[in-house]
Image (cartoon, rainbow, N blue to C red):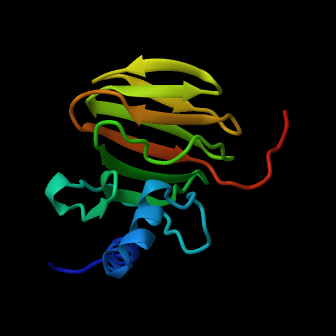
């Protein structure tokens, strides 16, 4: 390893802290990641590749998670991305809502999407969108592990109504 920039150092330190946390703390931290855009988040101004094998794995009671990146883009948007493996029959967390928005891109398995009380099944190649301040949740209703990427966009600051 030649050198690490500030963002890479933050990602590495965060991963090490999560790995040393207790099982319950690690599960809580990874099943509902902290919203992006905190004062400690780095500015993501350099392009780079993230190899799957380089992503630290955090085991949870319902599967596992791999943090990809989090930070603030030079244009001001706060983002966070992680990959989750969810065992059959489980939910990553109870239905909830938050200020930031999320996209979920399903690689494998079948998820049941709770969209503000309406359910829909979505499989490989499907994409879910969790709008800001709308109740949402999901559950692996298939027979195999569900694998999906989550991209969170925005901050959890008070809404500005348009």
- Residue beneath the point at 41% across and 19% down: 121
Q: Nearer the viewer, residue 107 or 76?
A: 107
- Residue beneath the point at 36% across and 22% down: 126
Q: How far across and how far down the image is residue 20, in percent?
A: 33, 81
Image quadrant occupied by the N terminus: bottom left
Image quadrant occupied by the C terminus: top right
**Count of picture labels:** 0
Above or below, comparing residue 16 to residue 89 in the picture: below
Q: Nearer the viewer, residue 100 or 51?
A: 100
Above or below, comparing residue 81 to residue 144 in the picture: below
Q: How far across and how far down the image is residue 142, in percent?
A: 28, 27
- Residue beneath the point at 48% across and 27% down: 113
- Residue beneath the point at 68% across and 34% down: 134
Identity of the residue furthest to the front in this view: 89
**Residue 139, image quadrant:** top left
**Residue 156, image quadrant:** bottom right
Q: Is residue 66 left or right of residue 101?
A: left
Identity of the residue furthest to the right in this view: 161
Above or below, comparing residue 94 to residue 134 in the picture: below
**Residue 91, image quadrant:** top left
Q: How far across and how far down the image is residue 70, in percent?
A: 45, 60
Instruction: Report whether residue 64 is seen.
Output: yes
Instruction: Report whether residue 45 is seen.
Output: no
Q: Nearer the viewer, residue 28 or 159?
A: 28
Q: Is residue 141 left or right of residue 158?
A: left
């Amino acid at each position: 390893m030649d050198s690490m920039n500030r963002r890479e150092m933050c990602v590495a330190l965060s991963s090490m802290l999560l790995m040393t946390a207790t099982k319950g703390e690690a599960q809580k931290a990874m099943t509902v990641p902290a919203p992006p855009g905190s004062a400690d988040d780095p500015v993501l101004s350099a392009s780079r590749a993230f190899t799957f094998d380089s992503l630290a794995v955090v085991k949870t009671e319902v599967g596992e998670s791999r943090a990809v990146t989090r930070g603030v883009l030079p244009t001001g948007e706060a983002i966070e991305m992680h990959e989750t493996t969810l065992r059959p029959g489980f939910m990553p967390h109870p239905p909830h809502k938050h200020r930031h928005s999320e996209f979920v891109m399903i690689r494998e398995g079948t998820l049941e999407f709770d969209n503000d009380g309406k359910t829909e099944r979505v499989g490989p190649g499907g994409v879910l969108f969790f709008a800001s301040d709308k109740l949402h949740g999901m559950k692996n209703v298939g027979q195999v592990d569900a694998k999906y990427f989550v991209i969170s966009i925005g901050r959890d600051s008070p809404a500005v109504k348009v």
